[in-house]
Image: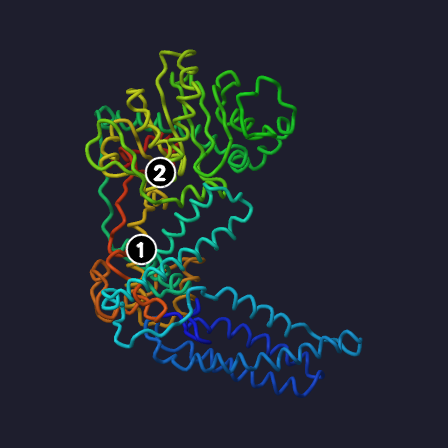
Amino acid sequence: MPGMVAFGRRWGIASDDLVFPGSFELFFDCSGGRVLHSYLVVLLILLAFIILSLCAIVYVSAQGTITNPGPRRSIPVLVYVRAMLYVPELIWAILGAIWVWVGRTHFFPSIWILLLSTGVGVLFVFDPLGSTHPGPQSQELLGVRDLESSQGSQLLSTARSVAVRVWESRLRLLCCCLPRDESHRAAFSSIAQLVSGFFSDTDLVPSDIAAGLALLHQEQDKMEQCRDPDEALSHSPSSPIAEDLEAELEKATHCMQFAVAAYGWPMYVYSNPLTGACRLSRDCCKTQSAEYDIVGGDNMGCHFSSVLHSTGLQYRDFIYVSFHNQIYEIPFFVALDHKRAAVLVAIRGTLSLRDLLTDLSADCENLPVEGVSGACYAHKGMSQAASYICKKLLNDGILNQAFTIAPEYKLVITGHSLGGGTASLLAILLRSSFPTLQCYAFSPPGGLMSKALADFSKEFVVSVVLGKDLVPRLSYPNMEDLKRRILKMVSNCNKPKYRILLQGCWYELFGGEPDDFPTEMDNRRKEELNQPLLGEESLLIRSSSSYQGLASEESPVHGSHLPLYLPGRILHTKWNITLLIKFRITPFWL
């Protein structure tokens, strides 16, 4: 870090990232020389020059720290030398291939492997935004002065639009199997703007992020070990708090099986690896009778069959089942839960690429709710998914049909992950029509709804969070905080990156005690991790001329993104919820 500038552009690799690829190629060249000793003396001489250049690249790349590239200033020159050696290497490889073709000798294909791996590596580290255009020498590092001029504003706008187009192209390539309709194009554009804005103000390469995460993980583990154990709050078995907790846990456990069942056959097979496939094979691929007309989007019948097995309900208990899946349109089913006297709506979580696009559409969208004072907005993708299900339930008469059959039942909504967030917003939309409804959301995303909506939902929504689950803590402000902490860690660590990555991989794979170097912060206090980026840390902001001006007060790093919160009351437990009921373990009620 920062990204290396070579051949007139910035690349998605830093000057200290060449230790491992250089060592890899060095190994191949050394082992290949023994096999090819009879090929040509010229090849041996060529290999000698290549080995010398690689040794120099590996040695120089291992110098300095992540934020001190000074000792590695000669890396671009060494890269140029190695690149020039590719020309005779390629020519000699072609001659060797011709020699093999005429059958005169056996040619070991190591050179072709290296050339192919090099080509793939160049494509991987190529940065479409890395073209350098020298700007005025008077520009400051962050381009603040330039932003005050019309030229700076134009540069900022152009850079942002280019970044958005690049991310849109990446999304279209990733989702090449999806149709190119208006909804998908709008989703690609929204996600591209969000992602490009998140990465626009830093000069981090992927290996920097990996090193920062390794440092931060070990630092947090060390702080956890030094922390005093939490005091357990004990309640009498007959106290009102314990009774309320036990009742909520029993209800949540019951609803959890429906939230899991909404995933269909993949989750059922995963939960029953030995017998699941055999049980479903008897029902899948059979011709569906007329009574299965309530099931949509399940051509082979495997999804609905798994729902029947998972919930223990009969076909007559289901009012509507939809496995139709598009962006902002997620599967759900409506059933009569006679055990709890409830009309139950279960919404599926993330299981497809379309669901992932719905998750990533994390912009804020207005969600006006009658009777709620304050700003009402929510996660765009899940808000639209909740609106889609709400229209289906009301306009198609699905809930009317259910309550016609069981008028004394109450409405219960549940879901997991994406389904949990959508279920919470759906409960808010239906609250005025069904005042007694309840919602149990399992691991809903942390960046879901505004503070006003979160407070409003506390009366009828329970969010169940298990341990250190990532999803309930996932929000744009939290991601910005994570980025800031990573920048702090890599800026204050005085060890080379290759050592951080090697020891970090060992720690992740085999555990052990956290290393000491994550806290070697030049005698600075740990509290500095919570302070704004100042001084040397500002060097982490993109400094190449192609990125100057991207950091501004409008950037998300300044906290312009609206804060979003978890819905309702939060039931946080370190244990699996089924075990809580079985062993009567008291969770943390927040």
Q: Nearer the viewer, residue 405 or 130?
A: 130
Give the mark nearest the N terminus, 2 or 1: 2
Amino acid under label 1? Leu
For the C terminus, which image quadrant? top left
The disc at residue 92 is none
Q: Residue lying furthest right in this view?
A: 103
Indicate the secondary structure of the residue bearing disc 2: loop
Q: Is 247 rendered above or below residue 587? A: above
Q: Quadrant of residue 581?
A: top left
Does 442 sit left or right of 117 as displayed?
left
Q: Position of residue 363 (x, y in %)?
A: 34, 45
Do callouts 2 and 1 mark residues in contact (Cβ within 8 Å)? no
Q: Is 150 rendered above or below residue 83? A: above
Amino acid under label 2? Pro
Q: Position of residue 305 (x, y in %)?
A: 56, 26
Does 515 sit left or right of 290 as displayed?
left
Mark 1 closeness class: few <14, some 14–19, many ≥20 residues within 10 Å:
some
Indicate the secondary structure of the residue bearing disc 1: helix
Q: Position of residue 583 (x, y in %)?
A: 36, 31
Question: Circle 2 sits on which residue?
Answer: 444
Point 53% across, 38% down: residue: 270
Point 80% across, 76% down: residue: 102
Point 56% across, 69% down: residue: 119
Question: Circle 1 sits on which residue?
Answer: 482
Q: Quadrant of residue 151?
A: bottom left
Q: Nearer the viewer, residue 82 or 486?
A: 82
Q: Position of residue 249 (x, y in %)?
A: 33, 29
